[in-house]
Each structure stands twice: as structure tokens, then as C-alpha cells.
Image (cartoon, helix red, strand yellow):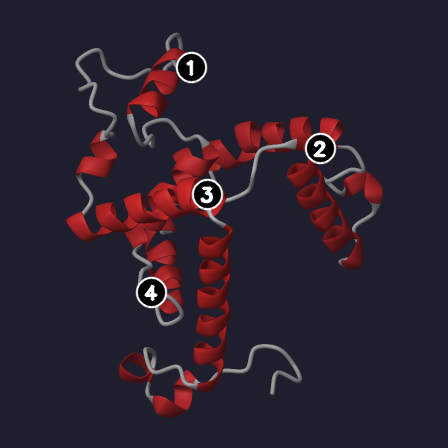
Amino acid sequence: MMGIREDGENFEALVHLWRVVGYMLGIENEFNVCTDSLSTTLPRLRLMVAEILVPCLKNHPPHFHEMVKHMIEGLWCFNPFLTTPAFTYLTFRAAGVPGYYFGKEEQALEIQRLKNTPDHCPADAENDGLSPTYKKMPWWSRFILAFIIYILETLIYGSVIFRWIFNTNITSSLFIIKWFPFLAFPKFGIRSSYVRILNGDD
């Protein structure tokens, strides 16, 4: 779903990466969600998603969407294909929040998963694979969402060349935002657009 192959080797590498990051941040092993084993890490992650992330996204605070809007608009200067509705939907879908599916297969899985729960799909829901939340989004955000899903779930897996192009695009964006952030000029002004976040970032 997020551009990572769901096999043991890739997941082991990802878990090891975040375990090392936690260690570098000073997190003791007993508090680090990433362990030395994939078989013990995945249940922890699933529990965190089910017990913490999903409830927080479903019952978010009043200013949640306002905060997300400002954050996405700030990042727009780095990537003009960011839209608040598209990336909010993508986040909720990745977490498994009910009502945020994409495609008939995901809709069928959600209906089965939530059959006997308070979050079950309405009996009169259309079987077109598109959620009511998705249908309310502006057309541009729907296009961006579909495009991002296509990239992460199809193109990245299918071609080494496309992965190279994708990585080159990210590297180029980092270079531009550092040395010539022209997308930020109209919004923040030329002087305020040049920001150095890290010490020694020259």
C-alpha cells in the first residue's frame, strides 16, 4: 500500500531501519516498538494501529482538519501535487479507518470485516468501490489520490526504471526546495522562502 513489498526480506529491513532509528534517538529496547524479530514487531504495530491510531483518526479533535490543511499547504511548495483531501484520505485508508476504501475489492473486504460491528457499511451502499467520502472530494483531489495509489501499488513494483525516475524526482525536489524554492516565492516572499532547518545545512 505504501510502496514497500510485503515480503519477509523487505519488512525485516524496514523494521531493522526503524529499530536503529529508535536506538539512535535513545529509546531503550523494551520501549522500542521495533524488535529484532518481524514476528514480534508486526503484532505490536497492528495493536497500535487498532487501539491508538484508528480511534484517534475516527474521533479527532476539533482543529484536526485545520492543522492538516496548514501542514499540507506548507509542504505544497515542495510538491505541488499535494492536496489536503487526497492525503487525508490516503492516511485514513492506510490506517484502515472504516469508510476509506478504494476499489471494489477493498469495499468487499471492508463489508466482510465490519459486518457485525457498529461501523458496518449501510445496506443501501453502492457496490461501485468508491466510498461516499471519496465522492465528496473535488475532482483534482480524486485524480491525485488515484494517481498516488497507482504509483505506490503498481508502478514502483513493476519497473526498476520507474523507481529510479521516482527517486530522481524526489532528489531533484529536495535540491530545488533548498537552492531555488520558486514555488514558495509567491506565498512567502523570496527572502522568507529560503529556510535552513538543520544546523550546518549549507
- Expressed as whole percent of the image width and height from the top left, the position of residue 95 reads 47, 35
Label 2 SS: helix
- Of all residues, the one furthest to the bottom in this rendering is 191
Q: Which mark is first along the chain, 4 or 2? A: 2
Q: Which mark is first along the chain, 2 or 3? A: 2
Crowd tier of the residue under label 4, counting other residues whose Cα lies within 10 Å: few below 14, some 14–19, many 20 or above:
some
Which label number is shown at residue 73? 4
Name the residue carrying label 3.
158
- Left or right of residue 136: residue 80: right
Which label number is shown at residue 41? 2
- Expressed as whole percent of the image width and height from the top left, the position of residue 94 reads 45, 37
What's under tag 4, amino acid-wise? Glu
Dot 4 and dot 3 residues touching (CB under 8 Å): no
Q: Which mark is first along the chain, 2 or 1? A: 2
- Left or right of residue 178: residue 25: right
What's under tag 2, amino acid-wise? Thr
Q: Is residue 120 above or below residue 167?
A: above
Q: Which mark is first along the chain, 1 or 4? A: 4
Spatial CA span between label 4 and label 3: 31 Å
Which label number is shown at residue 113? 1
Spatial CA span between label 3 and label 2: 28 Å
- Residue 91 occupies quadrant: top left
Spatial CA span between label 1 and label 3: 29 Å
